[in-house]
Image: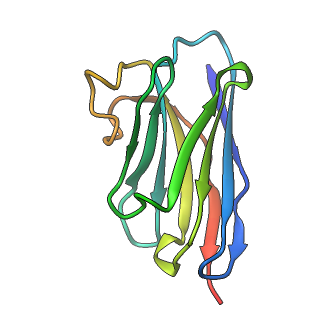
Amino acid sequence: QVQLVESGGGLVQPGGSLRLSCAASGRSFSSKAMGWFRQAPGKDREFVAAINWNAPGTYYADSVEGRFTISRDNAKNTVYLQMNNLKPADTAVYYCGISSRDPRRYNVRLEGPYDYWGQGTQVTVSS
């Protein structure tokens, strides 16, 4: 079993920034990608960003392109999501996922390729 623990969520004013972290632990796992998804009240979970774990490659939803940056620290088994210029529409529970599938062959913008998920961290953007 692989455990994913997200942190860094909170309340921020519009235009502000937050940095989310997701640390993976547990049994040895051949990770190929990690990603962030979010779910707002009354809405389906949607893709935010993903990163190739062993090669260059990042993927973003159009709604966050240019404002959010995903990065990784392989030594710490941790993925980060730097969120700048936050908007009220970014309010949601943010989940990270880990995938054993090569993002060059599988669409990591979909939930299907992900094997494990974290419990989520709440991000609220409000004045």
Q: Position of residue 122 (x, y in %)?
A: 64, 63
Q: How is the image coloured?
A: rainbow
Q: Locate residue 85: give its quadrant.
A: bottom right
Above or below, 78 relative to 8: above
Q: Would you say residue 43 is visible in this rendering?
A: yes
Residue at 46 percent of width and 68 percent of height: 40
Q: Is residue 2 left or right of residue 109?
A: right
Residue at 42 percent of width and 61 percent of height: 64
Above or below, 82 relative to 76: below
Residue at 31 percent of width and 41 percent of height: 110
Q: How many numbered marks appear?
A: 0
Query: In front: 39, or 79?
Result: 79
Q: Quadrant of the C terminus?
A: bottom right
Q: Position of residue 88 (x, y in %)?
A: 52, 80
Q: Position of residue 36 (x, y in %)?
A: 50, 46
Q: Would you say residue 99 is visible in this rendering?
A: no
Q: Is residue 115 left or right of residue 17?
A: left
Above or below, 63 relative to 42: above
Q: Locate residue 66: give its quadrant.
A: bottom left
Above or below, 40 relative to 88: above
Residue at 45 percent of width and 25 percent of height: 56
Query: In front: 68, or 48?
Result: 68
Query: In front: 93, or 35?
Result: 35
